Amino acid sequence: MAKAPRTFVLVHGMWHGGWCWSRVAEVLRGRGHTVTTPTQTGLGERKHLLSPSITLDTFVADIVNHLKWEDLSEVVLVGHSFGGAPMSGAADQVPERIAGLIYLDAAIMEDGETWFGLLPADMVAARKRLAQEFSGGISLPPAPPESFGVTDPNDAAWLAPRLTPHPFATLVTPLTLANRCGNGLPAHYITCTSPAYPPAVLCLQRAQERGWPISSLASGHDAMVSHAQDTADMLEILSSQVRAMNGAQADSGT
């Protein structure tokens, strides 16, 4: 376990909000760590702000401004699923506030890439059609809990009513980076394996190509819901190791 208290900022993915980290945050706070869980514009308790003008730049600004206004430093920044993209954007802009990055089954995107640009064409076409039918293309309706590997009835009943439509433009607007994804900061990838989440497979491959350390969780995609204790344990361990494990990476800028 971590030898000293850490500061965690936990970034959620599509259709979720900061609320999805509540179980993990409770464990980490109980062990003396500082934990914040920002919700991105248009989602969760900020769903009233949903609009077609919300882009990936908006999401990056959400995280950057959270770090600045909360005056956070030496942060272990954790991104889940699509949350990996704005996390990378924040790392590009304010690396001085970040101790390390943990991608939890999360998107790894480079400058100029869109999330839909990484997905199979048939999946993209289906989601574009669904968004158009659902909201005239403004948002994508939530996927069911089982698609995230959440099969326990109690967990599914907790998750389903909290999921909110996702701002569609964030999926088709490019990520803007001045540096390579991760910006040379210590980085670690966690893959959720039981079952694997198909959209995350490419991102795992990218982490492997970069030579990032990789850990596995025997959980579905929404590990922070279905396996909160295991997720908290792993984040705590990695928070104390990320610098040492990735020192060479940070030095080389890979």
Image (spheres, grey):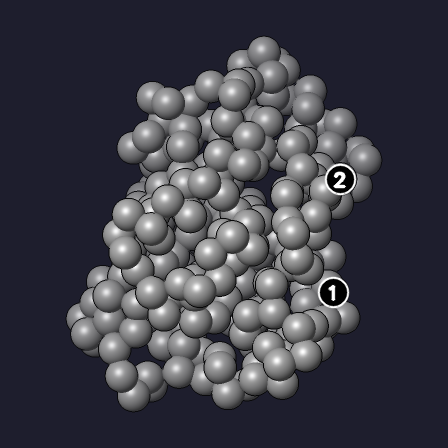
Q: Residue at x 38, y 57 (%)?
A: 10
Above/below status of 23 relative to 167? below
Q: Nearer the viewer, residue 133 or 19?
A: 19
Q: Residue 165: x percent and y percent? A: 47, 28
Q: Residue furthest right?
A: 121
Q: Residue at x 72, y 43 (%)?
A: 113
Q: Quadrant of residue 75?
A: bottom left
238 relative position to 125: left or right: left
Q: Amino acid at mark 1?
A: Gln
219 relative position to 42: left or right: right
Q: Residue 158: x percent and y percent? A: 31, 44
Label 1 environment density (alpha carbons within 10 Å; few <14, some 14–19, many ≥20): few
Above/below status of 133 relative to 243? above
Q: Are marks 1 and 2 in contact (CB under 8 Å)?
A: no
Q: Amino acid at mark 2?
A: Gly
118 relative position to 184: left or right: right
Give the residue at mark 1: 205
Kind of element beneath mark 2: helix
Marks 1 and 2, how far apart in space? 16 Å
Label 2 environment density (alpha carbons within 10 Å; few <14, some 14–19, many ≥20): some
Q: Nearer the viewer, residue 246 or 236?
A: 246
Q: How many marks?
A: 2
Q: Residue 151: x percent and y percent? A: 46, 52
Q: Residue 107: x percent and y percent? A: 61, 53
Can residue 100 be spotted in the picture? Answer: yes
Query: On residue 117, which mark appears?
Result: 2
Query: On residue 23, which mark appears?
Result: none
**Which of the two labelled residues, at mark 1 and mark 2, occupies the earlier sequence position?**
2
The quarter of the rendered structure image containing the C terminus is bottom right
The quarter of the rendered structure image containing the N terminus is bottom left
Can residue 104 be spotted in the picture? Answer: no
